[in-house]
Amino acid sequence: MKKGKGSRQRYITPMFLVLAIAMLVMAILSFWWNIYVFIVELIVSAAALSLIIFGIVNLRRYVCRTIAAASSYLGNAGKDRINKVSVPAAIIGNNNEILLVNDLFIKKVCSNRNPLGDLISDYLTNKNPDTMYEDNGTDTFVNDKWFIVFAVKAGESSVVYFVDDNLYKTNSDEYVLSRPVVAIIAFDNKEELEREAEEGEASRITVLVEKTIAKWVSTTSGFYKKISGGRYLFILEERYIKQFIEEKFKILEEIRAIEINDRMNATISIGVGRGGATIKECELWSRQALDMALGRGGDQVAVKKNETYQFFGGLSKGIEKRDKVRTRVIAAALTNHINNSSNVVIMGHRYSDLDSVGACIGMWSAVVKGLHRNAYIVIDRQQTLAKPLVTSFEKAGFEGIFKSESEALSLIDDHTLLIIVDTHSPNFLESKTIYEHCSKVVVIDHHRMMVNHIDNALVFYHEPYASSASEMTAELVQYLGDYSLSRLESEALLSGIMLDTKNFVLRTGVRTFEAAAFLKSNGADTVEVKRLFSNSIDTYKVKYKLVSEAEIFNYCAIACADSNTPDIRIVSAQAADELLGIENVKASFVMYKTGKTVSISARSLGDLNVQVIMEALGGGGHQTMAACQIENVSIAEARERLLSIINELEINKKAGSQADTA
């Protein structure tokens, strides 16, 4: 232990005193050997002895003065008075060394060990003596007990009290650890299992999944019950959820190891509600958390506490639902809301791309031509990334359908219906003002669910497994009135699908090709669609300059664009796509700065979830395509943040692999 000034003198002074006496004896003995040596040794011994006696006197004066100052506070001098204090107490000097204690301090705090000379900080958990003087004191854990430590200044000294609150702390900790937590577990791909596998095999897999869950539950004292075909209720205590969080919910990996067939693994999603005032509130939060987990693609855990979420897992791609019953139900509800509205305003996200504008055009066509209601598309012509598509429609005589924010605001009334496509976050809307002015809202989106999402929608059509908003719109328009899309409108939707699937390479399912086939049957020309992706020679050169200058870090390609690069938003997205073609690159990130904002376009082939990385930087998106914007930072600072997150994910991944091996 560290010692204070008084402590050092207390232990060192007797040692020097012995040495000084020894020197004096040696000096006397040297009298018969050499008179000069005798005189020198005698002088040195006398000086040392004088200094030591002076130190002892000073120390005693210091201790007496300190104790006297404390005694004036206690009312009487001496140890008798401090022993009358009913809690462990100590008197400390101005260097925080312990000078006097009562018997209770020795017994309860020190386990019958003499503490004189120790620093009081040795008995404090946070090691900061200043916290003792605060109004609420400071908590400390010493000698296997909890104490609240208070201190009072008394001249040059302080009187310190250790109030035993071990029983309260123990009961308080037990209360917190025993609070109920509600979890709802969903077998994500049970329906796909039953459809793909033979009856006996499907039953075997279901039993295996349930046994794995039951084994996981058995490590707790919780309650577990099957509540529906593929859902299970799990009620446990807070102490166990902390353990699961530390393990990052290894149950996800155990379930994922169960193979349904050569091309499918079992997955579960878990919604956890914790910290609620009642079990009912925790159950509500668990349902909301499960919806969030499923909305982000499944195969993950969402933990909700108050308004905050924690996410674990999310490594698998979303499971495609081939059943279109939900699409028909959504279309029926949407038809009803459109028919009961005075007009319809359609809007995508900021910096709208071909998918956003294509979906808007598809919905506009269905509303105007299929349901015979007035509809308009809100777009910022200066910031859209789909200028070729907008221009082609305006040349075809449809210039009146595109409205600016100010023009659209003049068309809104109490019965206006706002349809939002390709985003579900109010922070990414083309116009947040229009959203705030519309009381009736419909959302159609395919991006993985974000915590900050639109929660007042009449219809929230969210399918994270869909390739694009254009695919979802192409399915919906088939049920919105007796109307077939024209060639231009079909090409707009097909361009959106091709953009988000990278020409049918990423996130494509059976329904993606069915939607493309439907659009092709309505006259979509793939050559004309390809022209919408054409670049100028300057843009082409800039794109490949970015690719050539990229650096690779932990299988991630990172490129930084110059601030004066023309068409930087388009170029960065295309460069990010191109970087995925490099060997051993699992994800790509292209960074560029506009004003005070650094934007990052992120892409992957599915091996790395770029949505998780972008969310850590305040953005979002899909597992294979995401983006973010960081305010008031330089390119270098943003790059360091990105590298830090990538490195952290790599460390966690390695740690998980080592744990699995163990």
Image: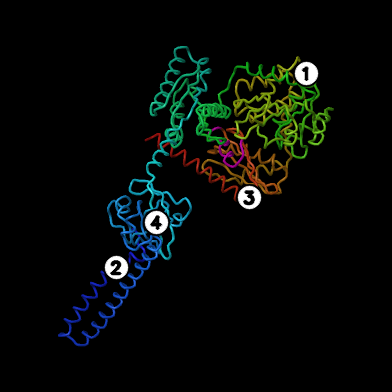
**Residue carrying label 3:** 633
Of mark 4 and mark 1, the one earlier in the sequence is 4
In terms of secondary structure, where does tag 1 sit? loop
Three-letter residue code for mark 1: Leu
Count neighbours of disc 4 (C-alpha within 10 A) and say few if under 14, some if 14 to 19, many if 20 or more: many
Tell me where the magenta segment starts and ends, as one range. Answer: 606-620
Q: Nearer the viewer, mark 2 or mark 3?
A: 2
**Residue carrying label 2:** 12
Q: Nearer the viewer, mark 3 or mark 4?
A: 4
Q: Quadrant of the N terminus?
A: bottom left
Task: Measure the C-alpha gap from mark 4 to mark 1.
Answer: 81 Å
Q: Nearer the viewer, mark 4 or mark 1?
A: 4
Q: Are marks 4 and 1 in contact (CB under 8 Å)?
A: no
In terms of secondary structure, where does tag 2 sit? helix
**Residue carrying label 4:** 160
Can you give x and y, in whole percent of width and height, for residue 563 in the image?
69, 49
Count neighbours of disc 1 (C-alpha within 10 A) and say few if under 14, some if 14 to 19, many if 20 or more: some
Task: Measure the C-alpha gap from mark 2 to mark 1.
Answer: 97 Å
Task: Measure the C-alpha gap from mark 2 to mark 3.
Answer: 57 Å
**Residue carrying label 1:** 371
Q: Are marks 1 and 3 in contact (CB under 8 Å)?
A: no
Task: Measure the C-alpha gap from mark 1 to mark 3.
Answer: 48 Å
